[in-house]
Each structure stands twice: as structure tokens, then as C-alpha cells.
Image (cartoon, coloured by chain):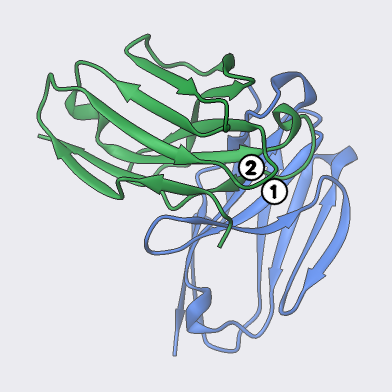
Chain colours: A blue, B green
Amino acid sequence: GIQVEQSPPDLILQEGANSTLRCNFSDSVNNLQWFHQNPWGQLINLFYIPSGTKQNGRLSATTVATERYSLLYISSSQTTDSGVYFCAVKRGSTLGRLYFGRGTQLTVWP
Amino acid sequence: ETGVTQSPTHLIKTRGQQVTLRCSSQSGHNTVSWYQQALGQGPQFIFQYYREEENGRGNFPPRFSGLQFPNYSSELNVNALELDDSALYLCASSWDRGYTGELFFGEGSRLTVL
């Protein structure tokens, strides 16, 4: 399977700070998604970004597929940003199977 | 709200029992996949269903089985429950077997095995 490594594993910020989360993957992929897992367990879709750059409000993401990494940027952090952020990737040959990293636990203090 | 709904949200079983979890896919999606998420881990792929047939399976034993119905909803069945089966079970729906495009997840079913 594909190895997905996320860093840092834990991140503690004060409200208003900016942060960068990284996802490295071991093989070429045709799908990369970033999720935020809320306290109730639901995975909230943040970005579908197999390549390129996207922005959505205070969040943006960049995937450099040729170098096998993706970055998630969070600007002006808010306490509601707290939770676990997952990166997940998929190869075309594995149909709908997503390979997840272990996540980054983000805690934002007021 | 993704449109993917799961039931029940929480349940408690004892070792050796059987459990059935249910999932309704998002409107327009014909593919359902199931994931198991143990505490502190990322979700792990169990299997995927497309056109009522299993067409991809992760490293899970045969006591994990599933069904997909003509309306694309799905069930996950786990027989002979073990303590290690305690986890959050997530259902995801997608289009066209998920070759490309996003997967959307439900809120999950949290299973505790005592």
C-alpha cells in the first residue's frame, strides 16, 4: 500500500496564529483529500486536491504531486479549528480505497 | 452535512455477538466503502461495494462482511465480535467506484465491545 506520513503529530497554537501541516506520501496518487475530524468523529471534507493549489477562506492547500507531498495552511487560527486533520491519498488501481495518515492533532487556545 | 447517514451512532456489544451497521449514501453516488478507525489512528479501509458487489477489500478477516442494496445503501456486518473490534466505523460514498473524485463520509457508528 501507500505510506502516508503527516507532521507534526501535535500542534498547539494560540488563537490568531498561522500554521502549516504537511503530508508526505510514498507513491504517485490520483486523489488527495484533506479532512478535519470533528469531536463527534465525522470527517469533514476540506480539500480535494490531487495537484495544484486551492483556497477556501482561511484555509488553503497545495499539492506537489511530482514531489509527493501536500501542505495545508491555516491562517488566523480560531478555537473552532481544533481537532484532528487527516490527509488521505488514493491510487487509480485501488479504486475507492483511501490511505490515511495518522493525523495532526491541532489545539487552538483562546 | 454530506448527505451520508449512518446508524446507529453508538452501540455496545459483548464479545462473540454479531453487529450490523447501516449506511445511506449521498444522492447520486453509487459506491459505498467502509472504514474502521481505532482510537488515535487514521481510518483503515475495510471494503468497497459497487453495483451490489464487493470490489475491493482491505486486510480484514471474513467475519467482516457487507451488502449493498439496489438503492446504493449498505450494511456492514461483523460476526464473532472481539474486543479489538471496538472502534469508530465510517461509511463513505462516492461516484464511479471512486476512481477519481471525492469521497464523502458519514458521522460514523461508534462500537464498543465488552
Residue B40 left/right relative to B28: left
Residue B69 left/right relative to B39: right
In this view of the protein, which residue sits in the foreground, B82 or A102? B82
Q: Of helix, strand and loop, which one carries label 2?
A: strand
Q: Quadrant of the C terminus of chain B?
A: top left
Q: Where is residue A15? Give x, y as percent.
A: 53, 88
Q: Of helix, strand and loop, which one carries label 1?
A: strand
Kind of residue sitting beneath label 2: Ala
Q: What residue is drawn where x is 81% and y is 70%?
A: A55
Q: What residue is drawn where x is 39% and y is 36%?
A: B22
Q: What residue is drawn where x is 38% and y is 64%?
A: A39
Q: Where is residue B62? Give x, y as percent.
A: 37, 9
Residue A67 left/right relative to A48: right
Mark found first going from the N terminus, 1 or 2: 1
Q: Output the chain of dot 2.
A: A
Which residue is identified by label 2? A88
Examine the image and state in which quarter residue B95 appears.
Answer: top right
Kind of residue sitting beneath label 1: Gln
Q: Where is residue A98? Give x, y as percent.
A: 62, 34
Residue A77 to residue B24: above or below: below
Respond whether the residues carrying marks 1 and 2 are from the same subunit. Answer: yes
Question: Which mark identifies residue A33?
Answer: 1
Whether label 1 touches label 2, CB < 8 Å: yes
User: What is the C-alpha distance between the residues marked 1 and 2?
Assistant: 5 Å
